[in-house]
Image (cartoon, rainbow, N blue to C red):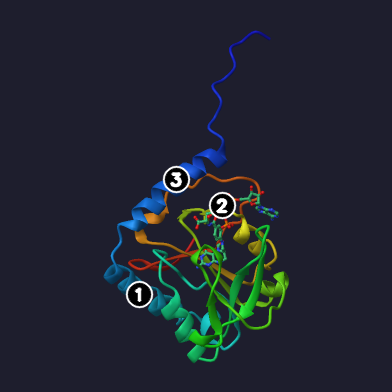
């Protein structure tokens, strides 16, 4: 065949990298007061969900930097008697999990993260959670999420069953019509934003 080749479609990974840069730059513009308000709204919307308030296990993340704040949510769930697992980033990109046992149970880790210091329960511990509260840079209408690019949450979400509630936490402006997706991407069931609360997708 001598038909001219189609122009190459941009590789999804390239598109993702560009989008990440744009979204991270926008997060840099948020103020501490905005992030503080966002954290209260996220806590108020999420802590009342039955899967997160019945005293079972919830896998969450402990926000750092300009991420949508989940520290208030984590503290509230813990005070309510929920068993909160937080991720420990392993070399290679898998996540281990350990319990949040109050602010003193965290220590600074690589990449500016604050990670739990208690016993680690293994990569598969996430499968015991009634809900997984995932960090994301963007989520689209089909629940496709864009993460930081290490594939941590794609792997973690591939371990959870269909009865586990999976939520991506983002700012309102990060809820997009479409996020570039690759076959390994694992969608979330719902999205949480400060302005929109919890929306199932
Ligand atoms: N608060 C929080 N905890 C979390 C996550 C998260 O997104 N937020 N993670 C969600 O997956 C995991 C950590 N994932 C990470 C993925 C990539 C990089 C990273 O590439 N960081 C560097 C860039 C590379 C480098 O410096 O060499 C950076 O900070 O720019 C860091 C953490 C587990 N814990
Ligand atoms: N289930 C998996 N098992 C092993 N590696 C995986 C898996 N899922 C994704 N990966 C790896 O992770 C890399 C990064 O994926 P991607 O760019 O989609 O990350 P992300 O969804 O943005 O990040 P994260 O999941 O950490 O929030 C992929 O190139 C892939 O090699």
Q: Name the residue beneath numbered marker 1.
A: 41
Q: Are marks 3 and 2 in contact (CB under 8 Å)?
A: no
- Whether residue 176 sits left or right of residue 11 in the image: it is left
> Quarter of the image containing the N terminus?
top right
Q: Name the residue beneath numbered marker 2.
A: 149
Mark 1: give few (<14), some (14-19) or many (20+) Cα within 10 Å.
many
* 150 w.r.t. 49: above or below: above
Query: Helix, strand, or loop for circle 3?
Result: helix
- Whether residue 31 sits left or right of residue 180 in the image: it is left
Q: Are marks 2 and 1 in contact (CB under 8 Å)?
A: no
Expressed as whole percent of the image width and height from the top left, the position of residue 41 reads 35, 74
Q: Distance between the Cα atoms at labels 2 and 1?
A: 27 Å
Q: Is mark 2 within 8 Å of ligand 2?
A: yes
Residue located at (69% from left, 78% from top): 120
Residue located at (56% from left, 40% from top): 12
Q: Name the residue beneath numbered marker 3.
A: 19
Q: Give the mark nearer the N terminus: 2 vs 1.
A: 1
Which residue is outermost to the top? 2
Q: Give the number of the mark in front: 2 or 1.
A: 2
């Amino acid at each position: 065949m001598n038909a001219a080749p189609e122009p190459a479609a941009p590789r999804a990974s390239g598109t993702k990298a560009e989008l990440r840069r744009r979204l991270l730059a926008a997060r840099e513009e948020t103020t501490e007061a905005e992030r503080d308000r966002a954290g209260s709204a996220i806590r108020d919307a999420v802590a009342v969900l039955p899967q997160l308030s019945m005293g079972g296990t919830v896998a969450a993340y402990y926000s750092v930097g300009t991420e949508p704040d989940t520290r208030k949510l984590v503290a509230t769930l813990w005070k309510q008697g929920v068993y909160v697992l937080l991720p420990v980033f392993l070399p290679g990109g898998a996540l281990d999990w350990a319990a949040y046992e109050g602010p003193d149970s965290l220590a600074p880790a690589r990449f500016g993260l604050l990670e739990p210091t208690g016993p680690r329960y293994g990569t598969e511990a996430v499968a015991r959670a009634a809900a997984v509260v995932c960090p994301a840079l963007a989520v689209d209408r089909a629940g496709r999420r864009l993460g930081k690019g290490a594939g941590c949450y794609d792997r973690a979400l591939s371990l959870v069953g269909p009865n586990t509630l999976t939520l991506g936490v983002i700012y309102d402006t990060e809820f997009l019509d479409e996020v570039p997706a690759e076959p390994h991407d694992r969608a979330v069931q719902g999205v949480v934003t400060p302005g929109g609360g919890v929306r199932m997708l």
